[in-house]
Image (spheres, grey):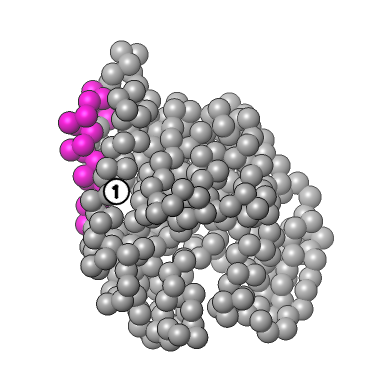
């Protein structure tokens, strides 16, 4: 790690002003920035510490939804009564992420800004070609070991997967990210690589995530986060699904459905085709299985990650069936 200067911000305005300077990076829980610095990817000239900013760790709720401060810890949000009751998929996505120690340290804002776990991105000493680190240098993953790489939202420049769990649930329920003077839908906040794989988040220099608002809905109240991975703990998703379901009064017809995928795409992936196919339909296995295949429309595999194209629809179908009382 190279030497850097340290600034403990006393206000959000001071933090924004300092973060706007060239070479400055923001730190809160430190579980992302320090990791990147140790890998030799991040080399800040100034570290702006926002840990002690008051009020940014609050969790508040109204009839319209819940607002989560960016400095709230992952564990605190996962265990919060309102989150567990009104947004169970949010709580589950956090509980199934990382380890207990990391959840106690990592902040919600930092979690959204975490970068890909692509090994070609995270090992610059061995893999020189990475368009996320050095635009135009190439993508070492294409033609390499791709088991954990994305099949959706990829481009010829990058196939690295998004590692988030919380982000998937937030996308499913139309969360909004507060960036101080502006707000942005969480689905727009995350960027597919396209021709600019070095850009993963739509946040400008000098902006801070201050809070996340999640609208209340019956689908969010009846929701689940289902995560399939190689081992039961401290592992990223091979495929995951955040699903919310609202039924008509007959208890059989789908009034509202929310579906988002994780582990299979370059960003948290909203499966709107699945939603459209099932809203108004009866909850029954054949229809769910048929519609769930739409989740991977446009998927492109690179060999070893082909299994994700088969796995993702099954995860979606299982989640919907559980919510509908079929599994």
Decide which of 272, 222 is in the foreground and name it.
222
Q: Quadrant of residue 302?
A: bottom left
Residue 251 lies, in percent from the top left, at 32, 16
Decide which of 180, 275 is in the foreground and name it.
275
131 to the left or right of 326: right
Q: Is residue 288 magenta?
A: yes
- Which residue sits at x=55%, y=45%? 94
Identify the image quadrant of the N terminus. bottom right
Say if residue 23 shows up in the picture. Answer: no
62 to the left or right of 256: right
Task: Identify whether 73 is placed above or below 91.
Answer: below
- Which residue sits at x=54%, y=38%? 91
Q: Is residue 295 magenta?
A: yes
Task: Identify whether 91 is placed above or below 50.
Answer: above
Say if residue 87 shows up in the picture. Answer: yes
46 to the left or right of 270: right
Task: Give the prevailing secondary structure in the magenta stretch.
Answer: helix
Task: Identify whether 93 is placed above or below 127.
Answer: above
Q: Mark 1 = which residue? A: 312
Q: Quadrant of residue 127?
A: bottom left
Residue 321 lies, in percent from the top left, at 31, 30
Task: Magenta stretch: give its range.
Answer: 279-298
Residue 36 lies, in percent from the top left, at 58, 72
88 to the left or right of 37: left
- Which residue sits at x=72%, y=76%? 46
């Amino acid at each position: 790690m190279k030497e850097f200067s340290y600034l403990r911000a006393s206000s959000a305005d001071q933090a924004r002003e300092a973060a706007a300077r060239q070479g400055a990076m923001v730190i809160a829980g430190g579980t992302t920035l320090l990791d990147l610095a140790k890998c030799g990817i991040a080399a800040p000239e100034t570290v702006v510490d926002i840990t002690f900013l008051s009020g940014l760790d609050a969790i508040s709720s109204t009839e319209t939804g819940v607002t989560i401060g960016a400095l709230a810890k992952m564990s605190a949000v996962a265990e919060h009564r309102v989150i567990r009751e009104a947004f169970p998929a949010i709580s589950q996505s956090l509980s199934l992420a990382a380890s207990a120690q990391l959840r106690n340290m990592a902040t919600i804002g930092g979690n959204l800004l975490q970068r890909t776990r692509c090994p070609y991105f995270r090992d610059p000493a061995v893999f020189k070609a990475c368009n996320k680190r050095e635009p135009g240098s190439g993508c070492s993953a294409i033609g390499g070991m791709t088991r954990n790489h994305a099949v959706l939202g990829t481009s010829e420049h990058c196939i690295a997967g998004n590692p988030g769990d919380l982000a998937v649930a937030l996308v499913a329920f139309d969360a909004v990210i507060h960036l101080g003077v502006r707000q942005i839908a969480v689905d727009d906040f995350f960027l597919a690589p396209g021709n600019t794989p070095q850009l993963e988040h739509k946040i400008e220099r000098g902006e801070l995530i201050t809070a996340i608002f999640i609208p209340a809905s019956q689908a969010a109240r009846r929701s689940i986060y289902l995560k399939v991975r190689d081992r039961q703990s401290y592992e990223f998703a091979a495929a995951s699904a955040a699903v919310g379901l609202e039924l008509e009064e007959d208890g059989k017809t789908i009034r509202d459905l929310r579906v988002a995928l994780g582990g299979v795409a370059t960003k948290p992936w909203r499966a709107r085709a699945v939603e459209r196919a099932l809203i108004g339909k009866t909850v029954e296995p054949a229809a769910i299985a048929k519609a769930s295949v739409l989740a991977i429309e446009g998927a492109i595999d690179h060999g070893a990650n082909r299994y994700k194209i088969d796995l993702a629809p099954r995860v979606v179908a299982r989640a919907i069936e559980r919510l509908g009382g079929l599994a």
